[in-house]
C-alpha cells in the first residue's frame, strides 16, 4: 500500500468513527494569537503542548526556520489575514534550538538540486531573471538571530497596526522549554 493509500484508508476510519469530534473548532483563534514557527517535525505536537494551545486556539503559520523572508510574501500575508480577518491580537515568532536553517548551506543545496535533475540552464535562467539562489536559500547564524530578524520584519511592516505586540521565542525542541527573546508587549 502506498503512503497516500495508507493515509486515505486511515482517514476513512477516522471519519467513520467520528474521531474528529475532539478537534471541532471554528476558524477564529480563541486565544487571539498568530504564531509563526518552523516546519520542523519535532514541533508538531510539542509546540502546542508547551504553549498550552489546543485545536482552535491560535493560527499557526509554519515554514522553514520560522522566517519571514519577504515583507510582502505569503507568510506575512498570512499574519495580516490572521489579524485583520480572523481576530488575532498578538503575534509570536517561535524558532527552535537545533534548527536546520541555522546550518543551511546554499552551495550544498544547489548541488543537491543539480543532482536531482535540475539543469544548469534552469539555474542560469533564474540567476539572469534576478533570482539570487544563494541569497534566497540562506539561513541564519543562530536561532535567536533568526527570531529577532523575523520579529523586526513583522513589527516594522507598514500594514501592521502599532497596537499589535510581536514577540519572539525560542523553544528547546527536546524539552519544550521556551525562552522569551523579544518581549513585544506595547506599553500604553
Image: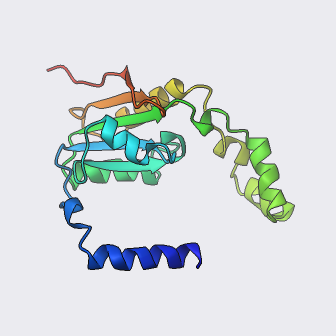
Residue 1: where, in percent of width, then height?
Answer: 58, 79
The structure residue drawn at horizontal position 71% and vertical position 57%, both measured from the top left corner, is 129
Residue 73: where, in percent of width, then height?
Answer: 47, 51
Q: Nearer the viewer, residue 44 or 72?
A: 44
**Up-down: is 74 above or below 34?**
below
- Residue located farthest toward the left when viewing the structure as drawn: 188
The structure residue drawn at horizontal position 61% and vertical position 38%, both measured from the top left corner, is 101
**Up-down: is 185 above or below 119?**
above
Q: Is residue 25 left or right of residue 152?
A: left
Q: Kindly tell me whether residue 67 is visible in this rendering.
A: no
How many numbered tags mark residues here? 0
Among the 4 quarters of the image, the one containing residue 104: top right
Of the 4 image quadrants, the one containing the C terminus is top left
Among the 4 quarters of the image, the one containing residue 49: top left
Q: Kindly tell me whether residue 120 is visible in this rendering.
A: yes
Residue 111: where, in percent of width, then height?
Answer: 82, 50
Residue 119: where, in percent of width, then height?
Answer: 84, 64
**Up-down: is 142 above or below 90?**
above
Q: Nearer the viewer, residue 111 or 172?
A: 172
The structure residue drawn at horizontal position 50% and vertical position 24%, both measured from the top left corner, is 144
Colour scheme of the rendered structure:
rainbow
Q: Is residue 136 left or right of residue 121?
A: left
**Up-down: is 115 above or below 83?**
below
Among the 4 quarters of the image, the one containing residue 106: top right
The structure residue drawn at horizontal position 26% and vertical position 75%, both measured from the top left corner, is 17
Amino acid at each position: 500500500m502506498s503512503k497516500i493509500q495508507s493515509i486515505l484508508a486511515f482517514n476513512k476510519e477516522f471519519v467513520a468513527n467520528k474521531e474528529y469530534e475532539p478537534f471541532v473548532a471554528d476558524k477564529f483563534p480563541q486565544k487571539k494569537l498568530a504564531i509563526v514557527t518552523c516546519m520542523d517535525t519535532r514541533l508538531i505536537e510539542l509546540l502546542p503542548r508547551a504553549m498550552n494551545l489546543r485545536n482552535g486556539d491560535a493560527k499557526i503559520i509554519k515554514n522553514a526556520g520560522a522566517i519571514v523572508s519577504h515583507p510582502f510574501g505569503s507568510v506575512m500575508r498570512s499574519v495580516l489575514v490572521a489579524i485583520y480577518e480572523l481576530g488575532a491580537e498578538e503575534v509570536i515568532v517561535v524558532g527552535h534550538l537545533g534548527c536546520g536553517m541555522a546550518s543551511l548551506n546554499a552551495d550544498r543545496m544547489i548541488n543537491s538540486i543539480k543532482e536531482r535533475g535540475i539543469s544548469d540552464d534552469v539555474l542560469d535562467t533564474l540567476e539572469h531573471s534576478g533570482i539570487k539562489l544563494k541569497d534566497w536559500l540562506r539561513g541564519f547564524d543562530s536561532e535567536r538571530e533568526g527570531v529577532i530578524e523575523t520579529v523586526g520584519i513583522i513589527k516594522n511592516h507598514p500594514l501592521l497596526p502599532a497596537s499589535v505586540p510581536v514577540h519572539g521565542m525560542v523553544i528547546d525542541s527536546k524539552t519544550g522549554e521556551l525562552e522569551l527573546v523579544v518581549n513585544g508587549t506595547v506599553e500604553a
